Image (cartoon, rainbow, N blue to C red):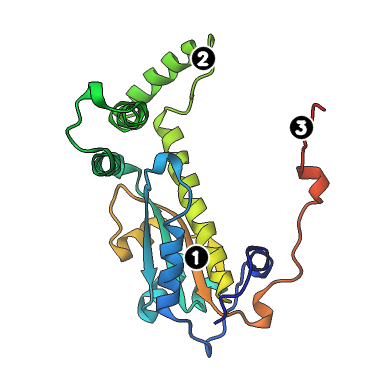
Amino acid sequence: MSTEKTVSEAIQHRRSVRVYDAEKPIDTAIVKKCIEQASLAPNSSNMQLWEFYHVTSKETIAKIAPFCFNQNAARTAQQLVVFVTRKDLWRKRAKSNLQFIDKNFGANTPKAAQSSREKVARNYYGKIIPFAYGDFLGILGFLKYIMISVIGLFKPIYRQVRESDMRIVAHKTCGLAAQTFMLSMAAEGYDTCPMEGSDTLRVKRLLGIPFGAEINMIVSCGIRKPEGVYGERFRIPFEEVYHKIDNS
């Protein structure tokens, strides 16, 4: 497959493909490369609260298809990639970021000798992230919300501190990875379809996905059949969704 597509060409090529050609397999190594590129997607606080399950087994795909309500995109897929959020790993990911800071600045630099950049980074992952993500049965999140709401009366402040807020953050982050993956696949001439319609509990059980994880979406992969694209692309007129703020 050609990798000569520009970003604009990949965006134009990408469609949600519902029927794949069974006679045209795709290269597992290329799909894995696209997943690796997905892991470079921008994400909230560089916490990388995601995991990617690359399903290449035809037998497993056949088992997952009914859990996707037998959508054509699942039944005819050559491969699947399950994008998973791991908000439950926030402590581990924060620790990884602190270890990265140790690697770059040194692990035992006295606080008085630390640069302002290092101090900010250590404070962020050592204090702010635990404040944002820490919770107990939603109780701490509610108390934080009340506190932030009061402070917010007097100055701008980050307000998304409840457990439900941080769950949304994790899913937004994972969605950025999924989009990066689909564009990477399009650049290779491969096709994809993001599927939100699935019995996520059954898929989790089948794949052995941890209890604390959540499925963001399942992306099917293959080479499109002509009938796999259901008509022309439709978008709301751009003028209805574009708002330019210009004070000049």
Q: Amino acid at mark 3?
A: Ile
Left/right of residue 41 with respect to residue 102 in the rendered view: right
**C-alpha span from label 3 to label 2:** 25 Å
Q: Are marks 1 and 2 in contact (CB under 8 Å)?
A: no
Q: Can you say whether 183 is above or below 104 in the image?
A: below
Q: Can you say whether 191 is above or below 214 in the image?
A: below
Residue closer to the observer: 201 or 242: 242
Of the numbered discs 1 and 2, the one sitting upstream in the chain is 2
Q: Residue at x 61, y 79 (%)?
A: 224
Foreground: disc 3 or disc 2: 3
Residue 219 numbered tag: 1
Residue at which label 2 appears = 152
Q: How many marks?
A: 3
Q: Residue at x 53, y 13 (%)?
A: 155
**C-alpha span from label 1 to label 2:** 39 Å
Q: Amino acid at mark 2?
A: Gly
**In the picture, residue 96 is in which quadrant?**
top left
Badge 3 local density, few (<14 within 10 Å), some, or many (20+)?
few
Q: Can you say whether 177 is above or below 127 in the image?
A: below
What element does badge 2 sit on? loop
- Quarter of the image with the N terminus in it: bottom right
Q: Residue at x 37, y 30 (%)?
A: 117
